[in-house]
Amino acid sequence: MPEVVLPIGPQHPALKEPVNFKVIVDGETIVGLELDVSYTHRGIEKAAEQRDFIRVIPLLERVCGICSHAHAQAFCTGIEEIMHLEVPPRAQYLRTIVAELERMHSHILWLGVAAHVVGFNTLFMWTWRDRETTQDILEEMTGNRMNYGMNEVGGVRRDLKPGQISSILSRLPKLEEQIGKYVGMVRGEETMLLRFRGIGKLSKAEALKYGTVGPTARASGVDYDIRRDDPSIAYAEVPWKVVTDTSGDVYGRTLVRIGELQESLGIIRYCLEHLPEGKIGIPAPKVAPRGEILSRYEAPRGELVHFIRTNDTDRVERLDIRTPTLANWTSVTVSLVNQNIADIPVIVAAIDPCLSCTSRITILSERGRRTAEMTWAQLVDHGQRFYRKWGRS
Amino acid sequence: MTGLLGLEEVKSALERFGTVEQVRSNRIKVKTIPEKIHEALFRAQTLLACDHLIQISALDNGQSFELIYHLTGPHGTVIAIAIELPRDRPEMPTTSDILPPAGIYERQIYDLLGIVFTGHPNLKRIILSEDWPENEFPLRKDWKPRPKTPYGGVRQEER
């Protein structure tokens, strides 16, 4: 049977971001994949060179909507090290609380999307309802549900009052109970096991070879987590453990993310209960001395890196951002080969791609002869109908 | 985690390629030349157990282009192998053959800074839109947008 090129996108109703997949298929089986995600390139790295350290942080928060704190944090940690600033512990704890709340809302959102693409909308509704808890807490702490504007060079911009701390603590047990229910659902629900187990397999050797990061790598048994390996903010002081799994498939990636939800909740609780007294920031100099730093941070999707070069001025000479999704694309193109068309949505969704902060393409092979068209919605629908009809072949 | 690499350990593996300096407890920087990058990366992989390429940082410092390969492994030490390329002839061999993730990073650098990686299997535009003008590399320090030049996203009939 001749190979067919199946373009999907760039309008992308499942993940609400523009991406164009050219999937090369032979019957139902994928033989190659080309991704075009260059629709949202905004030139942020160039723009960052034109702004001083105060004005660059709101810009960097907008690299990504979901992990806005991650980008601001990676930049602040780096520039503070170049400036030799000693940030007060209270500020570091507050940053950690926001960072972990961000990870929780990102993972809960992902779980909902993953459940939705396999047609399990009960869990989708549950997760998005429970995610409101984290969003409410974030809004109370920072004033915003997204793009929190919490960080600045030298500390944070808002403090927590004792009443707020007890109010947040009182809402955590309910969230913990719900996360416990997700564990049961993912491990026991036939719908999820059928669509997640053995799908998008990536061995540990492959995960390392293709430079995978974050939950995708940890689900393949790669024991890397920047929060432990290169700790910044308050991570070195908080008791928690790295979650890994050995199954290497979408099922494993789900278990890792749910395990991390539980760990994040523990970190938030610890930070709130042990919040040090003191200032929430110190004044930062306008100008950074000559220097360079590779600032690493564990964003919800994996290792995020900001390479910063400063040159005795009030702005960066170069800011090079490597987002976790860019690191994970190489492995997606590999794990999709020899899989079913029906599994594209769930495998692509399993790395939790964040497209506007990545804007890149990967090409594996292009040998197509005939072209057909399919939208993402049709593809999701095809996946659900395929499994309803055939089950697991 | 197996414990940080010592400076001596890194020196014994990589000093033959250039200067080795400890920047921070878990950061070691090695300066070398483009002709030796391949061998340096290979030795870092085999002798120092570096199994993860974090990033290839690329920048234009006005006089030359700098590329910095950041590698790490179970030891948690980040080894940065830095090289400089002349601005008038920015060309070097690809490293995607020994480091598969480098393929996508090299394409990004090629697109934004115009550094050519010879032997790359698929060195094509990756970040900028497909109708971005040829030979304009926006992250070069001397790049300025030219008025009246369409920088992509404009349909043919509107030009």
Image (spheres, rainbow, N blue to C red):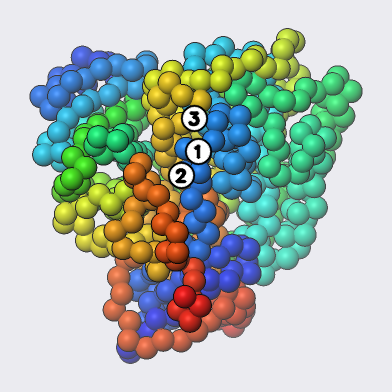
Q: Name the kind of residue labelled 1 in the image.
A: Gln
Label 2 packing within 10 angstroms: few (<14), some (14-19), many (20+): some
Return the mark for residue A46. 2
Query: In this rendering, does residue A383 appear at all?
Result: no
Q: SS of the residue at dot 3?
A: loop
Work out whether residue A34 or residue A182 is closer to the camera in this orientation and state it.
A34
- Observer-nearest of A81 and A248: A81
- Say what amino acid the circle numbered 3 marks: Arg
Residue at 33% over, 38% down = B59
Q: Disc 1 is attached to a residue of which chain?
A: A
Q: Position of residue A65 (x, y in %)?
A: 63, 48
Horizontal side of residue B134 vs B20, given as left or right: right
Alpha carbons under labels 1 and 2: distance apart? 7 Å
Label 3 sits on residue:
A315
Residue pictured at 76% horizontal, 48% vertical: A131
Kind of residue sitting beneath label 2: Lys
Task: Give the chain letter at badge 3.
Answer: A
| Foreground tag (1 vs 2) | 1
Tell me the residue that label 1 is attached to. Answer: A50
Q: From the viewer's perspective, is residue B36 above or below residue A219?
A: above
Q: What distance separates the C-alpha of mark 3 from that of mark 2? A: 12 Å
Quadrant of res B145: bottom left
Left/right placement of residue A186 relative to residue A27 reads right
Task: Give the farthest residue toward the front.
Answer: B147
Q: Are marks 3 and 1 on the same chain?
A: yes
Left or right: residue A189 versus residue B145 is right
